[in-house]
Amino acid sequence: MEIIDAIILGIVQGLTEFLPVSSSGHLELGSVILGNGKIPEESLLFTVVLHFATALATILVFRKDIAEILEGLLKFKWNEESQFTVKIILSMIPAVIVGLFFEEQLEQFFGGKVVFVGFMLLVTALLLFLADKAKNTEKGVSFPNSIIIGLTQAVAMLPGISRSGATISTSVLLGIDKNKAARFSFLMVVPLILGKIAKDILDGALTYQSESFGYISAGFVAAFISGYFACTWMIALVRKSKLRYFAIYCTIVGLIAIISGLYL
């Protein structure tokens, strides 16, 4: 992999991890466009590094929220911070189950399946369109809501379904305040990313070659910088109800993917 390719994929990962257009779907499409066909096994480390970069970007953006949550937890009381942590844990359960027990089945949807990605992008577009029409409220995330949002996050493991788009849209459609929906959506994924990285390390699935240091570093920096700005931008967009523009984008890209996959 060339450094320029790594930078491109890093920017794609950073932007699409937070913007509601599906990072996995765009990485699949990007790999096909760059001629890789699929993300090869030896590039698993590169993929993990990109996700780690976006996790760090999230932590940086929400550093004050995370500090408040940790401070509240250290009080060892059933306070707002403890309740929020339990909701995050509940939201993780569906994705953890899918990741642990259905990983092989999930992998079958990857590997350059452009048409499938296109249809899933259309699903993302529909969710964004519906959420954009929803009225704003001051309602917070309840315990049952966290489980429903978690189920949506598990479905979003499919390439083409935007994790942020699906979880934020589901939250808004449940009547949750848009700011709180975005905050919960971005914070709920950090433990999952870090857990997935830990699993890959413990499984011994990651391989490193010294000649790959350059493109891995370039991808990390690109993903971190683009992810930081995308996360900040997305929070503002959700607040201003601008999701319909991403719905249009996902529709266009989805249709192009379907047509190219079927006829080109």
Image (cartoon, rainbow, N blue to C red):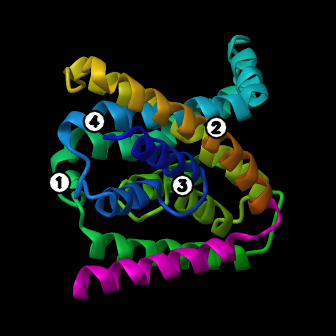
- Residue to which mark 3 is pinned: 16
Q: What element carries label 4?
A: helix
Mark 4 or mark 3, which is nearer the start of the sequence?
3
Between marks 2 and 3, how big is the CA–CA gap? 13 Å
Name the image quarter holding residue 249: bottom right
| Residue 200, x across and y down, in percent | 28, 27
Q: Are marks 3 and 4 in contact (CB under 8 Å)?
A: no
**Residue at position x 45%, y 78% in the image:** 122
**Residue at position x 74%, y 20% in the image:** 67
Between marks 2 and 4, how big is the CA–CA gap? 21 Å
Q: Does the magenta stretch include residue 170?
A: no
Mark 1 or mark 2, which is nearer the start of the sequence?
1
- Residue to which mark 4 is pinned: 44
Between marks 2 and 1, how big is the CA–CA gap? 33 Å
Camera sees residue 56:
yes
**Left or right of 223 in this view: 196:** left
